[in-house]
Amino acid sequence: MKKVVMLLSMLMMICIGLPSYGAAAASSDDQPIAVQGAMDVEVSALLKQMGSYRTETYGSYTYYIGFIDSVPVVVSRTEVGMVNAAASTTLLIEKYHPKAIVNQGTAGGHDPNLHVFDTVVGTKVMNIGNYRTERLANGQGIKPETWIFQETSIREHDQETSYETFSSDPELVKAALSAAPSYKHGKVTEGFIGSADVWNREVDRIQWFHDKLGTSAEEMEAAAVAQVAQAFHVPYLSLRTISNSEVSGDTIEDLTTAGQYGAEFAVEVVKAIDQQVQFTSLPSIYVKQVKLRNQQAVWNSNGEWLVPVRSVTEFMGGQVKWDDAKQQFAIQLNDAEAIVSLADGTVAVDGKPYSHTVLKQDGSVWVDAELFHTALGLSVDVLGSEVYIQ
């Protein structure tokens, strides 16, 4: 599990910018927890719990930034389907840098022992639409029972089946299960979530998935979110509340109520994660696509990623010169130079006020990564748990 843990009290803060998540952010490691739902019915209870929040929209994807109790959160409405889920999650990671992603919502039951309003904590998820068929000649028909689910060598595999699966983070699973007593509308159980851009209602096909793969339920987003989260090294959790089942004998089909119950449970899971999970790894720094060894970025409550200015500059072939008399340092890289002044307790870059953070301790200076863009024109990106400067 990963949580940015910074001892900023050991550092002297020279300049502080405006907080990214509001003035109520209380500590230096307050990256938000992201909670996703595909539809309004899957996020409305979360928004009600937040009370006040800021809304931001990029393309078709909407994000609500605020707090659940004192926990910073970003609620993401992904829209329905695998492509929407992947695109929305990529934007979520790039723009809000969540320390964990909780993907929750409704699902159709595959396990006959699960009933409407039961909730599945998905220990693993899989794209059940990712398969290949054996060749059959013209007139030989269709044989779904022979379809072979794909395996990809660069992905995580289930050791028994060799099928391509993505696991929820075990510490997030543990926190979710600890919140189970708060759920009063059915049982909470561990299970296996299948995802596809198909709504399956053929009982024989549902039973085939359950018998062949062990799926508990199916929906249309979880595997895509998990794949993106894994690519950017963001801890992930899947939660699904059963809204309908063709195999359990239930006649009720209630998407709205299941969506509300699932989101209410997600609120309790967020609280449990905040109280129980320790995220201990710091973000990696990539310079010119190469990972810096023994150097990691740190996050502060202003929403900034701080990097060691000397290590980054020297790795790129430049140098940093400190002038103690003037309380300033020069970053020299290729034909460019930037002067950063810390005199009089303020920060200026090339004589202009700079509103981001610069920290100094024992001769080492840490700066907001954005300084390399502002002062030297370099490209700076933060994706998941990685900072890229090039």
Image (cartoon, rainbow, N blue to C red):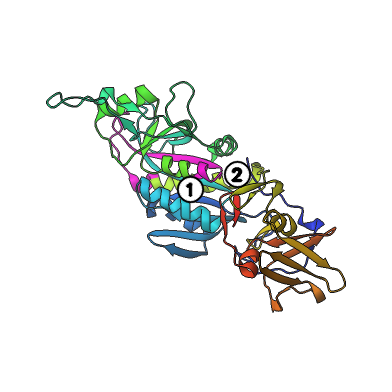
- Mark closest to the chain's N terminus, 1 or 2: 1
The 10 Å Cα crowd at callout 1, few under 14, some 14 to 19, many 20 or more, is many
- Residue at 57% of width from left, 61% of height from top? 379
Q: Amino acid at mark 1?
A: Glu
The correct choice, above or below, for 35 with respect to 360 in the image is: above
Task: Report x, y in % for residue 213.
Answer: 38, 25
- Viewer-nearest residue: 315 or 153: 315
Residue found at the far right of this picture: 325
Residue found at the far front of this picture: 335
Task: Report x, y in % for residue 150.
Answer: 37, 30
Asked which quadrant contains residue 355, the reply is bottom right
- Viewer-nearest residue: 161 or 324: 324
For mark 1, what is the residue? 264
Which label was assigned to residue 136? none
Residue 256 shown in magenta = yes
Q: Amino acid at mark 2?
A: Ile
- Viewer-nearest residue: 150 or 192: 150
- Residue at 67% of width from left, 44% of height from top? 281
Q: Is residue 30 visible?
A: yes
Which label was assigned to residue 273? 2
Give the left or right position of residue 58, taking residue 303 as reference: left
The correct choice, above or below, for 196 with respect to 87 in the image is: above
Identify the image quadrant of the N terminus.
top right
- Residue at 58% of width from left, 36% of height from top? 178
Residue 248 shown in magenta = yes
Q: Tell me where the magenta segment starts and ends, as one range.
A: 229-258
Determine whether the residue tagged by mark 1 lies in a helix, strand or loop.
helix
